[in-house]
Image (spheres, rainbow, N blue to C red):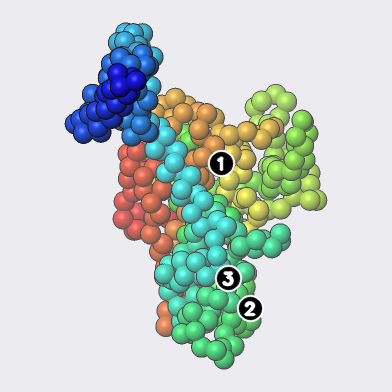
Amino acid sequence: MNSCRRIACSGWRSGLNTVFSRITAPSLSRSQATSAAPDPDTGEKPRLRAIDLAKEVQQEKTKPPVVEQRKKPQAEASGATEAETPPPPSGQQKRVMELKRFSLQLQQVHPNVLAKHLLRGVLYQDKDVVITNKPYGVPVKDDCGGTSISSVLPVLSKMMDGMKMKSDSQLIPCLRLEKETTGVFLLARSEEAVQHIHSLVTNNQVQRKYWVVIVGVPVPSEGVIDIPIIEREVPGPRPHYKMALSPLFRVSDTGEGVTKVRANRQSQPAVTKYKVLDSGSGCSLVELQPLTEVKHQMRVHMALGLTCPILGDHKYSHSSKLAPQKLPERVLGKLGLEQSKIRHLPLHVLARQLTLAGNTQGDINVTCPLPKYFKQTLNRLRLTFSDEKDQL
């Protein structure tokens, strides 16, 4: 009996010693705990704590990707590596973006923005008239209710009066300018001034000069185009209307002379004086002076009368269809454009000079500076112009 008690006591004491030895034993480090050997008593691996598992995951992430390093030389060898950054735009893309930015800069803008632009572009003003620089791509009138010159004239008039609350001044457009035409634009301050300007136009006391860049070189270099113009329908897949020539003479059947034909009742007399200021690279800088006011008169006379269409005229460069202007390879190279991008080229028509006669203080003579796109085209084509005295 005593021996049994001794055996039980000794077993109980050995169990306590085992427990205390485990408690007092120095704890393993995290790295040692993860690689600890199985327990000799139970034969099982110790359970890993959450912090130990997180450390293992972090170590796996920091290891270099062996598979990717093996694949990278193969991709470089095959030339299939992707560029980290997009390639810079080419000269062609920069040129197209520049033309787009210019032609769309004042379209769909707030009326106050357009009014401020017109205010900064004022070239002359007195108690009767205001002459400003019309921007490209903005119509004088818009029947659809969009932004136009006429729609912002009340705001412009108020700005010119110092933003006075009680201001009865007004600005009225007098001479017509097309949407794609830029340059001197005449505004009257009253109905009486409008009537006076119309009387000056009737008596040929208003002189307007335009500068255009045309494709080709006219022969002769100076002359007068006197061919009536009529509006006609152009049949085809896309029927549309265009202004066309309605000549009063035609070549005889024998080819030795001309015969007069009956004038069309719907045709309008159209007369345009022209003079070549410079030519080169297959293009010419020409000064035009229209003596009549007919829709698209200068464009029709240049494209159909002299067979030298205005640069950027995508309407009258083709007589029987609507398509972008077709330019020679030489001209495309000088302009830095491809034929597929030529539709972005703006119309090169500038209302350069306006002269009003009959003023008490003498004639009003206003000259408009060349817009940026016009200067760039002249520089690319190496076209220059002389002093004012050498012009029409």
Graded by Cα atoms within 10 Å as few (under 14), some (14 to 19) or many (20 or more), the crowding at tag 2 reads: few
SS class of the residue under badge 2?
helix
324 and 229: which is toward the camera: 324
Give the spatial CA distance, label 3 vs label 1. Answer: 27 Å
Residue sitting at 79 percent across and 51 percent down?
Answer: 266
280 shown above or below 122: above
Residue farthest left in this picture? 26
Numbered tag placed on residue 313 in the rendering: 1
Which x, y percent locates residue 88? 35, 33
Residue sitting at 53 percent across and 79 percent down?
Answer: 157
Residue sitting at 54 percent across and 48 percent down?
Answer: 224
Which x, y percent locates residue 316? 62, 39
In the image, which is nearer the foreground, mark 3 or mark 1? 3
Which quadrant of the figure has residue 378? top left
Give the spatial CA distance, label 3 vs label 2. Answer: 22 Å
166 shown above or below 24: below
Q: Which residue is mark 2?
A: 195
